[in-house]
Amino acid sequence: MMLGKDVSDLSTTAAGAAAQGLSIVVPVLNEAAGLALLHGRLTALARTLRQRYGLACEVVYVDDGSTDNTLSIARALEADGLDVQVVSLSRNFGKEAALMAGLDHARRGAVMFMDGDGQHPPDLVEQLVSHWIDGGYDVVYTAKAHRDNESFPRRLAVHGFYALINWGARQKIPEDAGDFRLLSPRAVAALRQLPERNRFFKGLASWIGFRQIRVDYEPAPRAHGITTFSPGRLIGLSIEGLTSFSVAPLRFASLLGVVLATVAFLFGLSILWETWTTGKSVPGYPSLVVGLMTIGGVQLIMIGIVGEYIGKILSELKARPIYFVAEHSDKRASVEKDASTGERTAAE
Ligand code: UDP
Ligand code: MG
């Protein structure tokens, strides 16, 4: 029995890569205002990629339960030089589930993930594709060049999060890396083999390994509307990510237990010593209460952490589908002429 997975048959050579094409997965939640503009930019991008690399493109819009007319706008978009799939989920399942739905429906070899709010500049995609085709990289991920515009507490929280999730990990998740990334065919195949339902995409895309490269960029301001990730939701997402991806919090709990027990033991020894040497009995009331409250609080936190993991086990065990697709539309590119141009370019 083979316990690992072999994805080596998926070629990443320039010619092989170009022949398989590229799927662009875009999760959208209430992005009606900017969708047509984004699609226009993606259409132009597909044209450029076809001319430069002979690369056939498809875009997969995953409507994550939008309440505005995102879906009707998406379905009306033209497949001008690139295939357009619109996958509409039965309700809002969250961005991670939407990304997974896109990955499941992507038909081309390589897959690129990109936000639907215009913050991930399509202009940068050419550079990402070049790292994949010319450079032979499997995971081309983007990261915020700097966090100057973010508050100090937020930066501290982000730093703490990555320190904890990467604690003791063999493969570290790069700090500041976003969901805007390109995966080569074999990296896509690897990602598809991961069976867990609680997915932390950033972590998994890093965990699979292969040749990875970082590209720094400055996210554009949101084209319209406001972010769906409020600070409260980000904290929830961080806890989700931590507990579904790493056992670091459990180790942290054990370590804290050991430290507290050691301190308590030393404190006890010092009391004994004092009583023996001076004959005084140590006044106990305040120290007792402080000690009790510390231990009580820490124990509750630890039970909470363990509880999070039990919740994860339960949800994996139930094995519910990550998403339901309510509607699916599929338009193939209507460009015989352009396609032949593409082939000619590829052959040159
Ligand atoms: N999104 C989604 N489902 C959600 C939340 C967000 O599909 O439940 C999409 C959203 O439409 C956008 C992307 O995920 O295309 C990133 O969301 P947002 O811009 O709100 O997050 P931020 O850029 O602030 O991290
Ligand atoms: Mg955004």
Image (spheres, grey):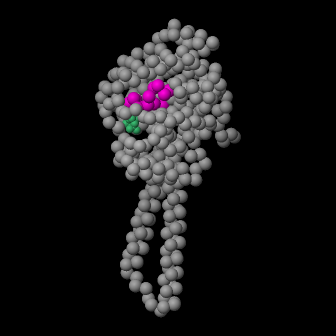
Which residue is found at the position 34% from the left and 21% from the top? Answer: 73
Q: Nearer the viewer, residue 195 or 347?
A: 347
- Is residue 147 part of the magenta span, yes or no? no
What residue do we see at 49% from left, 69% from top? Answer: 260
Residue 172 point in image, percent of width and height: 56, 46
How many marks the image carries: the answer is 0
- Residue 195 image point, x, y percent: 55, 40
Residue 253: x, y in percent? 50, 61
* Horizontal and vertical percent position of residue 166: 54, 50
- Give me the residue at 37% from left, 33% from top: 221
In the rendered image, which quarter contains the C terminus? top right
Q: Is residue 319 above or below residue 223?
A: below
User: Is residue 233 depicted above or below 168 in this figure?
Assistant: above
Residue 102 visible from this viewpoint: no
| Extreme residue toward the bottom, this view | 279
- The answer to which of 301 and 343 lies nearer the viewer is 343
Residue 203, placed above or below residue 325: below
Image-quarter location of ligand 1? top left
Q: Is residue 123 magenta?
A: yes
Q: Residue at x 43, y 51 (%)?
A: 156
Q: Is residue 96 visible?
A: yes
* Magenta residues, start to end: 113-125
Extreme top residue here?
Answer: 337
Residue 330, above or below 202: above
Please name the predominant secondary structure of the magenta segment in the image. loop
Residue furthest out toward the right: 1
Q: Quadrant of the N terminus?
A: top right
